[in-house]
Amino acid sequence: MEQSRNMTSLIMIFGATGDLAIRKLFPSLYRLFQKGKLDKFAVIGVARRPLSTEDFQNSVKDSVLTALGKKDNIDEFASHFYYQSHDVADSKSYLALKNLAEQIDEKYNLEGNRIFYLAMAPEFFGPIALHLKSDGLTDVKGYKRLVIEKPFGHNLESAKELNEQIRTAFSEEEVYRIDHYLGKEMVRNIEVIRFANAIFEPLWNNRYISNIQITSSEVLGVEERGRYYETSGALRDMVQNHMMQMVALLAMEPPIKLTTDEVRSEKVRVFRSLRMIEGEKINKYFVRGQYGSGMVEDQQVPEYRAEPMVDKESNTETFVAGKIMIDNFRWAGVPFYIRTGKRMTTKSTKIVVQFKDIPMNLYYQPEKLINPNLLVIHIQPEEGITLHLNAKKAGGHLDAQEVKLSFANTGIHAMNTPEGYEKLLYDCMRGDATNFTHWDEVAYSWAFVDNISEVWEKTKADYYPNYESGSMGPKAADELLEKDGFFWWPVTALEVDICK
């Protein structure tokens, strides 16, 4: 898996003047450079905007300084960056790009290795891939890899069409579909927690686990992304990719080996086992919401329909909660609850694994309930693991009280915690596609989500807005669990303790 060798590659970033490149990609590449993980490399920034290479290099330096506040060797780092103004629909632009790439390849001795990173709107993915093929940019003596961002299509049909376009120029093994959640340290840790601990893996099934809850809440609203969000909504923006990927990692069988193909194979088996929900049943398993006005961090904020570039009668959901059932031997009967939304109480992504009560609890008292055992995986903003157990009070009788065992990625660990994009870029250069999504995963998750979106789009939600900004979502999301005898564990009360 991990390889301790330096990387050699020419990286072409399409959309190099955009927000993603400036906020994430340039700082991540700089961190890899500082750690000595980039040896022979160069970057060509590609975008429509007319810009000199010098101006582009200054933009790269500003990006790194803004994000990291560092400037060690920054001039040397920026000297590896070049710029070309580009029309994605014009073959002449691609031929000019090819000539520049060949010159830079020779200058840095990059062995003909190419990474094409499409940090652009998804409607450009297919046309760019076809041009890269037809205009000869994929004819290289080294490896070629295509990195694309979500969303991969708007539904299953459009995803299939896009995949066919891309596959004319790149094989499946050469396509790296980024889901930045798979770069997060604690998401990657799910496999280790499960498969490297004898106290968890034997219990990781429907005999011992009552339910699993995945919450990904945001404080921010749609901000300036109103136009995009109107065509997406929380279901397509979060559930189809991030949430479903976390479900797959939590539910998959142990792979035979920790190789890309074996891990992906087990994740696909989870997606194949999903209980498909259709028609009227959708409302029994899934809840949608849209935020109204309210107070967030002591500031009054408007409702979703009052945001810029949002329809005044919008039917778009900003919140989704759902019950996902996996109909296989390991998980039959165990609900996986998910919820995600904007303008909620706090910014947090947490996984709560709730274990079943023991058959006969000797410490049960009618007036005092014993807390169930919980395993909490803290993904963001804090990173860590908390195990909630019951133990005797010091100096008291045999009364059980809750105790916490915590590990936090803080202090000495914080400095070494890589940004998600840094990790994924490094994996791409190494040729490790384990933490990227395979086409089969994309297709199955779209098939699952499409059933829900079709019903919601045909049905007007007359009750919007149905949750106040600054809350944890609509009441119906609480009722979804209550009818099963559960409740949402409050994410604000499940903080990871800092270990000193």
Image (cartoon, rainbow, N blue to C red):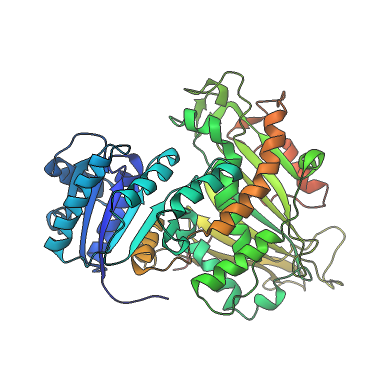
| Point 43% across, 48% down: residue | 149
Is residue 1 shown to the viewer in this render? yes
| Point 55% across, 21% down: residue | 311
Q: Position of residue 452 (x, y in %)?
A: 70, 41
Q: Nearer the viewer, residue 24 or 164?
A: 164
Is residue 392 shown to the viewer in this render? no
Reply above or below: 305 against 381: above
Reply above or below: 156 against 34: above
497 left or right of 463? left
The answer to which quarter of the image holds residue 268 is bottom right
Q: Position of residue 247 (x, y in %)?
A: 63, 58
| Point 60% across, 53% down: residue | 443
The answer to which quarter of the image holds residue 225 is top left
Q: Nearer the viewer, residue 260 or 86?
A: 86
Quarter of the image that includes the C terminus: bottom left
Q: Nearer the viewer, residue 177 or 195?
A: 177
395 left or right of 431? right
Reply above or below: 79 against 238: below
Q: How many marks?
A: 0
Q: Nearer the viewer, residue 346 or 452?
A: 452
Quarter of the image that includes the N terminus: bottom left
